[in-house]
Image (cartoon, rainbow, N blue to C red):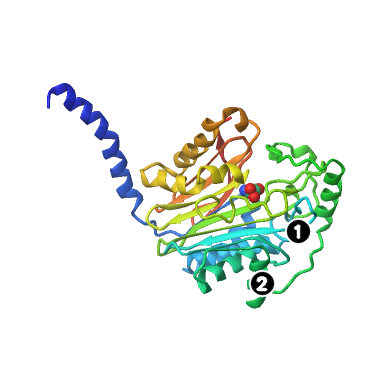
């Protein structure tokens, strides 16, 4: 090999070696429990998860407890209190994934309060990964989940009636940048707005427990006023959530179709495997969406949130406004995500 070829080969292998070294340290499990969750409503979710993590509980139990907290909150737009589809029906999506890559999900489930627990049961009691619609509801009922009333919450009813006037399906971006129109009528009120629009209707959370094991969950009512039967990224493993216990975990929020197109959270975890920090991994996944169609990206919001095996966290979004909450022994904080546009 002449010098020139040697230098060229060196230039090609150097970044690889750096990435490999970074990789080695990424794989050293952190021993401090931590939970991270999307949006400002993640504070109460994290508090619930922390009750499990702080007594050396399993990350899987922690994230299920956290997700159930927000599903219980009928003033919030994640669970049965969320906005309906265009036929006036609230349909919920959820998934869960543990440290062994076991996973379960439900999509388009109606009148069941805790889809995250149904998703866990799909994971633990069936050989399947996803159950949908009537079949998911039947499975939940057979396993003792009560059938709730199909009535819309007050705020959802009002928003739906307003929406029906025009019946336009238009996901709203940058809603977080409109504080002046926020309603102040409850702990999760910032998710609802006077002009009939809704904040992102999704809670994604990932956690690491005292043993260094990772798990994650997502729960959502999906995009408001969606076509009946539409499934977003949230219950899709590799799109709305991905956990790899060797590397890290990631979750997403925003326009699910765009996340599905790039297998978003799987991509984020793969970037972390290559040695990128959680924030950089999220940024690179966001860039994938933006570069694919820069003009369309201006009308979209997608945010990724990631946690690596060292307990480092980070996020990135297309637009300003994505935020996430962190709870560990060292911090309890709401972070504003960086963004591309
Ligand atoms: N990602 C969710 C979906 O597409 C929506 C959201 O994050 O608000 O269903």
Picture coordinates of residue 201, whole percent (x, y): 68, 50
| Quadrant where the image shows the C terminus | top right
**98 with respect to 84 (left or right):** left
| Quadrant where the image shows the N terminus | top left
Identify the residue at image location x=34%, y=53%.
Answer: 27
Measured Cα–Cα span from mark 1 to mark 2: 21 Å
Which mark's residue is nearer the viewer, 1 or 2?
Answer: 2
**81 with respect to 268 (left or right):** right
Q: Is residue 39 something one can see in this rendering?
A: no
Picture coordinates of residue 35, whole percent (x, y): 52, 56
Q: Is residue 318 above or below residue 49?
A: above
Picture coordinates of residue 239, whole percent (x, y): 53, 50
SS type, badge 2: helix
Q: Nearer the viewer, residue 292 or 179?
A: 292
SS type, badge 1: loop
Identify the residue at image location x=51%, y=42%.
Answer: 262
**84 with respect to 131 (left or right):** right
Q: Write down the quadrant of residue 186 in the picture.
A: bottom right
Q: Which mark is residue 108?
A: none
Q: Which residue is mark 2?
A: 138
Q: Is mark 2 within 8 Å of ligand 1?
A: no
Q: Which residue is mark 1?
A: 81
Query: Badge 1: few (under 14), some or many (20 or more) residues near its Cα, within 10 Å?
Result: many
Picture coordinates of residue 276, whole percent (x, y): 39, 41
The residue lying furthest to the top in this view is 4
Identify the residue at image location x=55%, y=51%.
Answer: 240
Q: Is residue 159 something one can see in this rendering?
A: yes
């Amino acid at each position: 090999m002449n010098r020139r070829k040697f230098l060229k080969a060196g230039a090609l292998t150097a970044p690889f070696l750096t990435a490999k070294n970074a990789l080695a340290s990424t794989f050293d499990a952190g021993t401090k429990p931590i939970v991270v969750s999307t949006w400002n409503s993640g504070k109460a979710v994290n508090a619930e998860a922390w009750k499990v993590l702080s007594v050396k509980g399993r990350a899987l139990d922690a994230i299920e407890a956290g997700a159930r907290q927000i599903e219980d909150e009928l003033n919030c737009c994640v669970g049965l209190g969320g906005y309906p589809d265009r036929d006036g029906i609230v349909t919920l999506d959820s998934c869960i994934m543990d440290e062994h890559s076991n996973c379960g999900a439900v999509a388009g489930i109606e009148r069941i309060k805790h889809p995250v627990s149904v998703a866990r049961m799909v994971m633990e009691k069936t050989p399947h990964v996803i159950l949908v619609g009537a079949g998911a509801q039947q499975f939940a009922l057979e396993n003792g989940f009560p059938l709730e009333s199909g009535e819309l919450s007050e705020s959802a009813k009002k928003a739906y009636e307003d929406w029906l006037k025009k019946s336009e399906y238009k996901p709203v971006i940058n809603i977080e940048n409109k504080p002046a129109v926020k309603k102040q009528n409850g702990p999760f009120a910032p998710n609802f707005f006077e002009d009939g629009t809704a904040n992102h209707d999704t809670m994604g959370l990932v956690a690491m427990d005292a043993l260094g094991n990772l798990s994650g969950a997502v729960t959502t009512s999906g995009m408001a006023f969606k076509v009946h039967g539409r499934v977003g990224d949230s219950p899709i493993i590799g799109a709305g959530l991905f956990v790899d216990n060797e590397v890290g975990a990631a979750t997403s929020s925003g326009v699910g179709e765009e996340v599905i197109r790039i297998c978003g959270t799987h991509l984020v975890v793969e970037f972390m495997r290559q040695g990128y920090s959680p924030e950089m991994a999220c940024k690179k996944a966001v860039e994938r969406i933006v570069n694919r169609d820069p003009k369309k990206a201006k009308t979209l919001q997608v945010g990724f949130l990631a946690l690596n095996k060292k307990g480092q966290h980070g996020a990135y979004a297309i637009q300003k406004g994505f935020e996430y909450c962190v709870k560990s022994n060292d911090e309890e904080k709401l972070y504003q995500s960086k963004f591309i546009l």
